[in-house]
Image (spheres, grey):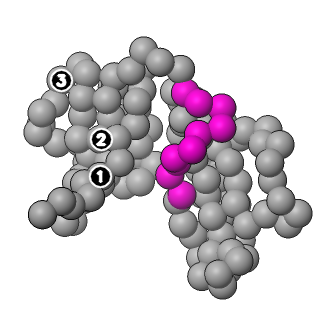
Amino acid sequence: MLRLGFPVLGVSDVPRATVFWTSALNLVATDEWASGRWRTLEHTDGSGRALALMYSESPPEPYPRLHLDLLVDTTEEQEAEVARLRRLGASEVAWDHYPANPDFVVLADPDGNRFCVVDLSRAPSGG
């Protein structure tokens, strides 16, 4: 039976990306398939894989069709997490596709991969 695994991000610097994403999402790097071209990250509670990082020479997409949404429950938490992620090396993206009163902030990791921090208290679905 086919199963969905975990997201894989293409990065130009696997060690740098490992530091960023383990700190950003409270994950741990595993030795599973670890190399200079691949790193698997898992949840600290041992519940399994969460994300993988794969060396890539292609540049990140400015408007990716697939991206990560990182979720928070309040506007205050969103502001605090965006600030924390920026301190870790993320950059805020000048996103020209924001709707009026967006519930998300678009950031880029140190490799330029775009992701969103979504405030569920303001999301269209109501969380």
Residue, far front: 1
Which quadrant holds residue 46?
bottom left
Residue type marked 1: Phe
The crowd level at tag 3 (other Cα within 10 Å; few <14, some 14-19, many 20+) is: few
Q: Name the foreground residue: 113 vs 28.
A: 113
Label 1, on which residue?
6
**Identity of the amino acid at label 3?**
Ser
Q: Is residue 99 above or below residue 31?
A: below
Residue drawn at (57%, 44%) of the image: 65
Residue sitting at x 47%, y 18%: 58
Residue 98 visible in this rendered orientation of the protein: yes
Residue 114 at x, y percent in the picture:
59, 40
State the CA–CA distance, disc 3 to disc 2: 12 Å
Q: Which residue is mark 3?
A: 35
The magenta segment:
60-69
The Cα–Cα distance between marks 1 and 2, rounded to whole angstroms, is 7 Å
**Mark 1 element type:** loop
Q: Which residue is mark 2?
A: 52
Residue 108 is left or right of residue 93, and the answer is: left
Helix, strand or loop status at disc 2: strand
